[in-house]
Image (spheres, grey):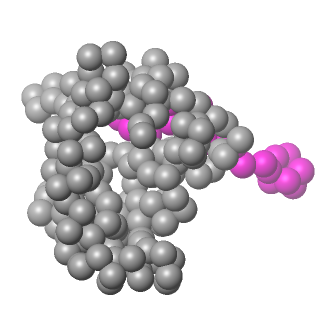
């Protein structure tokens, strides 16, 4: 199954100049079925964009043990993301712009490689998308796509890039810290 709007959102993100990478802690033996699934997702004549699929090089039982028994799939994902980031040393912590996942282990892995919390999206089984710092703020892939140009500004080479710290989405989105009376009045 796939959630409504995911194909259009990911395709629009890719059109804005970003590369899509699919990462799963599934065993390498599940590569064919996983790839077939990704290739089969088509919504309103829009398919998921092409991108590398990275799976655990471990066999099924080792991957199953890490993910289900030990409940630590982030170990593989973090190591994998760090390896991929090392291929782009000139980008430093900006090798990854955003991350979509469905578990807290995804949040852990994305934090470890420097993805800002405002760009980490967690999707629950109902298709509701939240961020780690605002679990009550729920959107869908389709409503996020309405803001795709603000959240994923055009990033093609040779074009001006919006400063991520000061764009409309990040400026207004993070929660404000409260000052005590002493700090406020000096």
Q: What residue is drawn where x is 66% and y is 37%?
A: 137
Residue in view at x 26 percent, y 17 percent: 45
The answer to whether 180 appears left or right of 84 in the picture is right
* 152 versus 123 height, above or below: above
Q: Is residue 6 above or below residue 121?
A: above
Q: Is residue 91 above or below residue 27?
A: above
The percent position of residue 71, horizontal first and vertical second, equals 51, 77
The residue closer to the viewer here, 119 or 107, is: 107
Instruction: Identify which residue, 4 or 8, lies in the foreground.
Output: 4
In the image, residue 61 sits, relative to residue 94, either above or below, namely below
| Residue 143, image x, y percentages | 52, 22
The residue stretch that appears in magenta: 160-186
Q: Position of residue 47 (x, y in %)?
A: 25, 27
Name the quadrant containing residue 91: bottom left
Q: Is residue 120 left or right of residue 176?
A: left
Q: Residue at x 19, y 59 (%)?
A: 31
């Amino acid at each position: 199954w796939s959630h409504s709007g995911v194909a259009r959102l990911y395709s629009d993100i890719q059109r804005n100049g970003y590369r899509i990478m699919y990462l799963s802690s599934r065993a390498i033996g599940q590569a064919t079925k996983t790839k077939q699934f990704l290739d089969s997702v088509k919504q309103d004549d829009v398919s998921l964009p092409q991108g590398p699929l990275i799976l655990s090089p471990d066999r099924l039982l080792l991957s199953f043990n890490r993910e289900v028994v030990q409940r630590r799939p982030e170990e593989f994902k973090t190591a994998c993301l760090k390896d991929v980031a090392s291929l782009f040393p000139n980008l430093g912590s900006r090798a990854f712009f955003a991350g979509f996942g469905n578990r807290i282990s995804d949040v852990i892995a994305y934090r470890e490689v420097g993805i800002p919390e405002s760009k980490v999206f967690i999707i629950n089984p109902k298709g509701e998308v939240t961020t780690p710092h605002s679990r009550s703020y729920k959107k869908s892939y389709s409503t996020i796509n309405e803001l795709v140009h603000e959240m994923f500004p055009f990033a093609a080479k040779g074009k001006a890039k919006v400063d991520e710290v000061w764009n409309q989405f990040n400026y207004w989105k993070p929660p404000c810290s409260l000052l005590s009376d002493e700090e406020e009045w000096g």
